[in-house]
Image (spheres, rainbow, N blue to C red):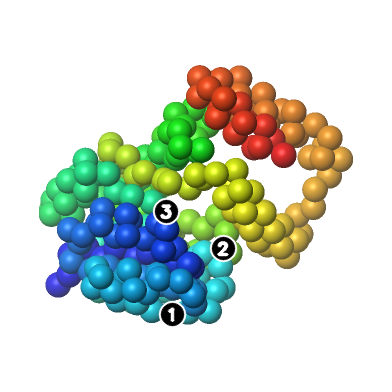
C-alpha cells in the first residue's frame, strides 16, 4: 500500500509548482488537483509523475477533499503550490509515517515569506497547520476559504518548518487578499454574519496594535510594519 500521498491544489502555478514538488519527491504518490490552469502547470506536474486531475473550482475545502478522496496513501500531506517542505521536515515526515506509535495527525509550523523576508512575529509564526494525517480518519470541511481538516483521532506536532512563499510582491499580496476576502465575505453573508459599526471604526486600530506591538511585528523591520498596516485593513 502507498504510504504517503502528497496532495497539491493548483490554478496557474507554474511559478511555484516545481519548487513545491521537488521538495516532496520522496513521496510514493503526488496528486495534483487543478482548476483548469492555462499555463505550464500540467507540464510541470508531469515532470514529477504526478496524477493530474482537473476539476471545476468550488472552493479550497472541496478541492482539497477531492485530493484526499483520490489519493491512495495511508498518510496524506496536503500542500498549496506556494509551500515547500524543508529538508528537516521531509526527514521528520519520513520518520513519523513509519513509526507504529504515530498519532493520527500532525500540526506543522509554517514560516511565511513576505516581500522576500521571513516573518517571525506579527502573529504569523509558528502558525501551526494540520496538514499531515491518516486518510482513514481525516477529511477537509466544505469551507470555500479558511478550510480545515476534521480529524477523528489524536494529534501531535512536528518541529521543522513548512516554508510558505506566499507574498513576493505587494501586488501578489493584494491579489490574494482581494480574492480571499471576497470568498470569505460571500460565505459569511450566507451564514448570516454582518460587519457592524465596531468592526469598521475600531477594529483596524486594534488589529494594528495587536500585530505590531503585542505580537512584536516591529522586530520584523519595515516588512513587519507594512504587514501590520495591511493586516489592519
Observer-nearest residue: 172 or 34? 172
- Where residue 21 appears, as percent x and y from the top left, is 29, 60
Q: Which residue appears at 49% of the width and 75% of the height? A: 38
**Mark 3 Cα-neighbour bin, 10 Å: few <14, some 14–19, many ≥20:** many
- Where residue 67 appears, as percent x and y from the top left, is 38, 71
- Where residue 147 appears, as percent x and y from the top left, is 52, 58
In the rendered structure, which disc, 1 or 2, sits on the residue that comes first in sequence?
1
Between the residue at mark 1 and the residue at mark 3, the CA separation in whole angstroms equals 19 Å
The residue tagged 1 is 54
Instruction: Please tell me the numbered disc located at residue 169.
Output: none
Between the residue at mark 1 and the residue at mark 2, the CA separation in whole angstroms equals 20 Å
Q: Which residue appears at 66% of the width and 37% of the height? A: 230
Image quarter of residue 32: bottom left
Observer-nearest residue: 55 or 113? 113
Asked whether residue 133 appears in the rendered view, the answer is no
Relative to 73, 166 lies left or right: right
In the structure shown, which secondary structural element does the residue marked by tag 3 occupy? loop
Please identify the quadrant where the C terminus is shown. Answer: top right
Asked whether residue 227 appears in the rendered view, the answer is yes
In the rendered structure, which disc, 3 or 2, sits on the residue that comes first in sequence?
3
In the structure shown, which secondary structural element does the residue marked by tag 2 occupy? loop
**Mark 1 Cα-neighbour bin, 10 Å: few <14, some 14–19, many ≥20:** some
Q: Is residue 40 above or below residue 138?
A: below
In the structure shown, which secondary structural element does the residue marked by tag 1 occupy? strand
The residue tagged 3 is 82
Between the residue at mark 3 and the residue at mark 2, the CA separation in whole angstroms equals 20 Å
**Mark 2 Cα-neighbour bin, 10 Å: few <14, some 14–19, many ≥20:** some
The residue tagged 2 is 143
Observer-nearest residue: 101 or 56? 56
Amino acid at each position: 500500500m502507498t504510504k504517503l500521498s502528497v496532495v497539491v491544489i493548483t490554478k496557474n502555478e507554474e511559478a511555484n509548482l516545481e519548487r513545491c514538488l521537488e521538495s516532496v519527491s520522496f513521496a510514493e504518490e503526488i496528486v495534483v488537483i487543478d482548476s483548469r490552469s492555462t499555463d505550464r502547470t500540467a507540464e510541470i506536474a508531469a515532470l514529477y509523475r504526478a496524477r493530474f486531475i482537473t476539476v471545476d473550482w468550488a472552493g479550497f475545502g472541496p478541492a482539497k477533499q477531492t485530493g484526499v478522496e483520490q489519493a491512495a496513501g495511508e498518510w496524506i500531506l496536503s500542500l498549496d503550490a506556494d509551500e515547500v517542505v524543508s529538508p528537516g521536515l521531509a526527514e521528520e515526515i519520513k520518520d513519523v509515517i513509519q513509526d507504529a506509535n504515530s498519532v493520527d495527525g500532525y500540526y506543522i509550523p509554517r514560516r511565511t515569506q513576505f516581500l522576500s523576508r521571513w516573518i517571525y512575529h506579527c502573529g504569523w509564526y509558528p502558525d501551526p497547520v494540520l496538514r499531515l494525517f491518516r486518510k482513514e480518519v481525516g477529511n477537509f470541511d466544505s469551507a470555500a476559504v479558511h478550510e480545515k481538516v476534521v480529524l477523528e483521532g489524536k494529534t501531535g506536532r512536528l518541529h521543522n518548518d513548512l516554508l510558505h512563499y506566499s507574498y513576493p510582491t505587494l501586488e501578489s499580496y493584494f491579489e490574494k487578499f482581494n480574492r480571499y476576502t471576497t470568498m470569505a465575505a460571500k460565505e459569511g453573508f450566507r451564514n448570516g454574519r454582518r460587519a457592524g459599526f465596531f468592526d469598521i471604526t475600531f477594529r483596524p486600530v486594534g488589529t494594528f496594535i495587536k500585530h505590531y506591538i503585542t505580537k512584536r511585528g516591529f522586530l520584523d523591520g519595515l516588512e513587519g510594519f507594512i504587514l501590520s498596516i495591511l493586516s489592519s485593513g
